Amino acid sequence: MAKNLMRAVQYSKYNGGAADLKHAEVPIPSPKKDEVLIKVEAASINPIDWKIQEGVARPFLPRKFPHIPGTDVAGEIVQVGSGVQSFKVGD
């Protein structure tokens, strides 16, 4: 895997279910002003993520495909946006 890529699970359309979840290598994002970048050690897909994939939040979420689901994560902060004050690299 190239140094500027990360592994992710993503889907490319609504209503694909578990069969549409695909492993991919994608560019590592840079955090925006009020965001942090986390090196994820563990993640889960929760019921809200499945509802979003089913299109319940359409047209708000996801804004574009492919989409990387998951908001339940654990890991280490490796980069912080310029406006972040409550967290630091290493947290």
Image: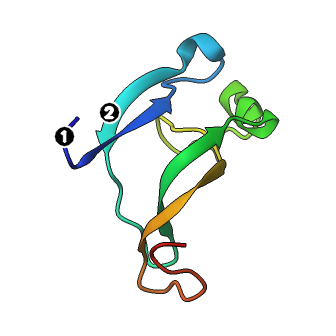
The one nearer the camera, 59 or 66, is 66
Which residue appears at 61% of the width and 23% of the height?
A: 14
Which residue appears at 66% of the width and 16% of the height?
A: 17
Tag 2 residue? 25
Which residue appears at 32% of the width and 39% of the height?
A: 26
Residue 49 in the image: x percent, y percent?
Answer: 71, 36
- Helix, strand or loop status at disc 1: loop
Q: Earlier in the sequence, mark 1 or mark 2?
A: 1
Note whether 65 is above or below 19 in the view shown: below
Residue 23 in the image: x percent, y percent?
Answer: 43, 24
| Residue 16 visible at all | no
Left or right of residue 23, residue 26 in this image: left
The answer to whether marks 1 and 2 mark residues whose Cβ atoms lie closer than 8 Å is yes
Left or right of residue 73, residue 80 in this image: left
The one nearer the camera, 62 or 2, is 2
Which residue appears at 23% of the width and 35% of the height?
A: 1
As drawn, which residue projects farthest toward the left?
2
- Helix, strand or loop status at disc 2: strand
As drawn, which residue projects farthest toward the right?
47
The one nearer the camera, 62 or 78, is 78
The one nearer the camera, 17 or 5, is 5
| Residue 69 visible at all | yes
Mark 1 vs mark 2: give the one in front: 1
Note whether 42 is above or below 17 in the view shown: below
Residue 78 in the image: x percent, y percent?
Answer: 41, 66
* Residue 32, quarter of the rendered image: bottom left
Report the Cα–Cα distance between label 1 and label 2.
Answer: 9 Å
Q: Residues within 10 Å of mark 1 (few under 14, many from 20)?
A: few
Q: Which mark is residue 2?
A: 1
Amino acid type of the residue that numbered disc 2 sits on in the rendered structure: Glu
Q: Which mark is residue 30?
A: none
Amino acid type of the residue that numbered disc 1 sits on in the rendered structure: Ala
